Image (cartoon, rainbow, N blue to C red):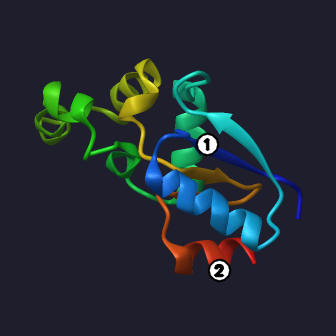
Amino acid sequence: MSDVLFVEYPKCSTCKRAKAWLDAHGVAYTDRHIVEDNPTAEELAVWQERSGLPVRRFFNTSGMLYRERNIKAQLDGGMSDAEAFALLAENGMLVKRPIVVGEDFVLVGFREAEWEKALL
């Protein structure tokens, strides 16, 4: 398996646990800081399609910015996927993390069972 892309916010405790899991299981990855190198709308669109998840699963719903900007109401109000990707691309803190991008899969958030199935 080639390296996967590990998109993270280094201060995030879930990201730290996920990175430790990758290291412990010998999974090769390329690290990417989600704020310094925020995913583009185009990348997010590709990742969302590859993940099979609804676009709202890519939002960091527990983040302050998500609440401050009342994004749930915008999503519930019928925001298009294109508008959602553009919004996510504005600020890495809006994006759920960690994200693991492989050749034919994308994992959003850290769920150990999902990661084992995709990565081991």
Q: Residues within 10 Å of mark 2 (few under 14, many from 20)?
A: few
Work out how far the residue at label 2 is from the one at label 1, CA to CA, in angstroms.
19 Å
Left or right of residue 57, residue 4 in this image: right
Query: Tag on residue 7?
Result: 1
Q: Quick one: label 2 or label 1, which is nearer the N terminus?
A: 1
Q: Where is residue 70 in the image (x, y as percent from the top left)?
A: 13, 30
Picture layout, residue 9 above or below residue 87: below
Query: Tag on residue 92?
Result: none
Q: Residues within 10 Å of mark 1 (few under 14, many from 20)?
A: many
Element class at badge 1:
strand
Element class at badge 2:
helix
Residue pictured at 52% horizontal, 39% vertical: 9
The amino acid beneath tag 2 is Lys
Q: Where is residue 78 in the image (x, y as percent from the top left)?
A: 18, 36
Left or right of residue 45, residue 60 in this image: left
Picture layout, residue 92 above or below residue 107: above
Indicate the quadrant where residue 115 lies. Answer: bottom right
Q: Position of residue 76 (x, y in %)?
A: 14, 42
Q: Position of residue 100 (x, y in %)?
A: 63, 53
Indicate the quadrant where residue 60 lies. Answer: top left
Residue pictured at 49% horizontal, 40% vertical: 11
Identify the image quadrant of the N terminus.
Answer: bottom right
Q: Mark 2 points at which residue?
A: 117
The amino acid beneath tag 1 is Val
Residue pictured at 36% horizontal, 24% vertical: 87
Work out which residue is located at the far right of the displayed protein and give it.
2
Marks counted in the figure total: 2
Do the residues bearing badges 2 and 1 touch, measured as CB atoms within 8 Å? no
Camera-nearest residue between 57 and 67: 67
Left or right of residue 97, residue 3 in this image: right
Identify the image quadrant of the C terminus.
Answer: bottom right
